[in-house]
Amino acid sequence: MLLSSAIANKYHEATKHTPLSVQIDPNYVDPRTQPVAFKTYPHFFRRFPLEPENSLHRFLSLTSAITYQKEYRDGTTQLLRVQPSAGGLYPTELYVQIRGIKGMLDGIYHLEPQNNVLTLIYELIDDGIEGYLHDDRLIHGCIFLVSCVYFRSSWKYKKRSLRYCFLDSGHHLGAIEAAAYILGYPYRLLFDFDRLALNEVFGFENKEFLTAVAIAGEPKEKTARRLRSPMPIVSGSDYFEPNSFIEAGYDDTFSEMPRRYSLQQPIFPLAPPQWLQATQQRRSARRFFPRPISRDDFGMVCEALQQPIPSEQLETVEIFAIVQCVTDMQPGIYRYPFSQKILKAGEFQKQTGYLCINQAIARDSAVVFFFTARFDNYRIALNQAGIIGQRIYLAATALNIGCSGIGAFFDDEVQAFLETDRSILYAMAIGQTTKE
Ligand SMILES: Cc1cc2nc3c(=O)[nH]c(=O)nc-3n(C[C@H](O)[C@H](O)[C@H](O)COP(=O)(O)O)c2cc1C
């Protein structure tokens, strides 16, 4: 095993669920102690409301919008967003640098989804985020930075939250991808940048870290220098408990980068208006009824998930599908491309339910996907799994099929079940959410 894979696997190993680990630590927390899920810069920063009739504003708003207010019996509420999040804890934040766009001040903004506003946190002159990227040519358009306020997730999920921070970042990137597709902005992703310098200049201390960069804009000839001065230190949670495992796990994902590919844009099988509706309506299914989905719908979901991810540095994520209830498909284990020969025929509902830590959504779904990889870079592999996961959510929603991410599974047992030596990154279930 290469040294880089060994380091990456160290974090995967240490965050595995086993029947014993979930008994010892079932992740019970006192909900009253939950850290806040929104970062807010002080009131005196200039704020710009995102107007629905402005195309760029709509693009920015769609990347992170609140789409549902969930009411609980005890009178509390939770704001749900375009992107899902493990446990609904939302560790990710989004920043956007805007340059050369009429009607907008050139600057770095923080997006406040709870108020649908941009907060201007830094005004640009000849400097910019480009100065921290390998290609420092000025970008006219948007540069998005996705970050994680990791304690929001480690508060509940402890070490395993390292995975959830990266998966949630991937979903947030997937939401940016969807917004870019809907509004016709070409975009690409960067996973390698000077994160030490950027985290410092953003004033993140050890509480927040950048996971990925998305660019929706055109490079110009001139280059940008690094930012003239640091931004103010503003905490992303109302209190904080450091977790050295998460911090080291994050640091180690910048030591080794995967191999380079040429940039390829995804082509989604559904038109932008359908993708928009799916983005606005997407929710995680809380229950499935064991009724079949059609083979065409399954094919459409697969078409969406297989689209290229527009980045030059990628891991290889291999996907298995446990087909449980799809018309005209033999139940059993398939490996992508799923049209090929079945790996193992059989009815595996009981096993998938058990493997996903006795979750009925896995047992009663029509298909459970498992994302696997032999990776060098854990962050990138999990980001990719989250991006693919967001596509599955949107395609399923557009087809009126339910969907849920599943981050909790018995790692080694899933691996044995699939007879693979690849690590299990993530699972997703799709299926019918109504009885008839
Ligand atoms: C990385 C990740 C892991 C998740 N794991 C599970 C899971 O194991 N079981 C489950 O029922 N839901 C899981 N979910 C779904 C979340 O609970 C859900 O996204 C969150 O409550 C917000 O609701 P929404 O997706 O309807 O907006 C997961 C979501 C993500 C993104």
Image (cartoon, helix red, strand yellow):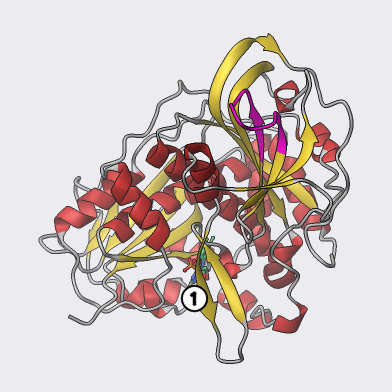
Report the amino acid beneath label 1.
Ile
Residue that sits furthest to the left in the current view: 328
Vertical comparison of 21 with 195: above or below: below
Q: Is residue 201 left or right of residue 66?
A: right
Determine whether the beta carbon of the residue marked 1 sits less than 8 angstroms from the nearest atom of ligand 1: yes
Residue 60 is at least partly visible in this image? yes
Q: Where is residue 238 shown, x and y percent of the image?
A: 82, 67
Which residue appears at 36% of the width and 79% of the height?
A: 287
- Percent x, y for residue 35? 76, 70
Is 195 inside the magenta-drawn segment? no
Residue interval drawn in magenta: 96-108
Q: The N terminus appears in which quarter of the rendering?
A: top right
State the residue lying farthest toward the bottom. 74
Question: Does the magenta segment cover residue 103?
Answer: yes
Instruction: Name the residue carrying label 1.
Output: 357
User: For the point 75% across and 21% down, which residue is it?
Assistant: 131
